[in-house]
Image (cartoon, grey):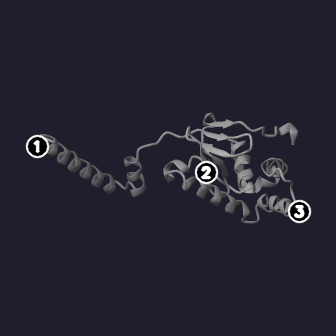
Amino acid sequence: MKTTNEINEKQNLMMEVKMMIRKLRDLGVSEKELASLIQTEQPLLKLTISRDYRLYLGEQRMEIRMEPLVKAVYLLFLRHPEGIIFKNLPDYRQELTRIYSDVRPWGLTDRALQSIEDVTNPMLNSINEKCARIRKAFSEQLPKSVARYYSISGKRGEVKKIDLVRANVVWKCKMPTSQGL
C-alpha cells in the first residue's frame, strides 16, 4: 500500500509534467513531438531472411508474411541500405527479376514479368501499392513506432529506404550478387 507521501509526490510530479507540457505547447511544440516524448523506445528485433526467403522477427521467429512480388521488392530495398529513388527503379529491374525468381521458384510467367515491369515503372502506382503492403505487414505485427524502421519510407521524389540498421538483418538465403545479375 502506498504511503501518503508517495501519493502526494506522485500528484506533485504529475502537476509539474502538466505545467511543462502546457509551456511546451505555448512554445509551439506539436502534439506529435509531445507524444514522442512519452513513448518509450522498444529495442528493434533482428530480421532473419531464411533459406526459403521467409521473413522472421526476433527470437520467437514471428513470421512476416508477404506475397512473392511484395517480398521481392522488400528484399531489393533491404539490399540497398543507401536507398532507391523511385524514378530510378527501371535501373533495378534486372535485379528485382532475379530476386523475384528466387522468391518464386515455380517460375516467372508472362504475367509475373509484366508485374515486375509495372512495379519498376515510376509512372505507375504499383511501387506505392507494394510499399503500403509492406508497411501493413509489419504494422500488423509491431507497434507503429517500431514498424516504421522495417518499412520503406522517404519523402516524395527523394530516396526511399528501409531505416533498419543492417546489423539487425540476418541473411540465411543466398541473395544474388551484383555480379550475378
Q: Residues within 10 Å of mark 3 (few under 14, many from 20)?
A: few
Q: Which mark is residue 84?
A: none
The residue mark sitting in front, 2 or 1, is: 1
SS of the residue under disc 3 = helix
SS of the residue under disc 2 = loop
Give the residue at x 56% y 37%.
59
Give the residue at the far bottom of this rendering.
124
Task: Please give the residue where the numbered disc 1 appears in the rendered image.
Answer: 4
Spatial distance from mark 1 to mark 3, Cα to Cα?
Answer: 74 Å
Q: Residues within 10 Å of mark 1 (few under 14, many from 20)?
A: few
Disc nearer the start of the sequence (1/3): 1
Give the residue at x 38% y 47%.
37
Q: Quadrant of residue 67?
A: bottom right
Give the residue at the far left of this rendering.
4
The x and y percentages for residue 16 are 22, 47
The residue closer to the viewer here, 179 or 61, is 61
Give the residue at x 72% y 60%.
127
The residue closer to the viewer here, 179 or 89, is 179
The residue mark sitting in front, 3 or 2, is: 3
Q: Which mark is residue 151?
A: 2
The x and y percentages for residue 49 are 68, 41
Spatial distance from mark 2 to mark 1, Cα to Cα?
Answer: 47 Å
User: Which amino acid, mark 3?
Assistant: Asp
Disc nearer the start of the sequence (3/2): 3
Q: Quadrant of the C terminus?
A: top right
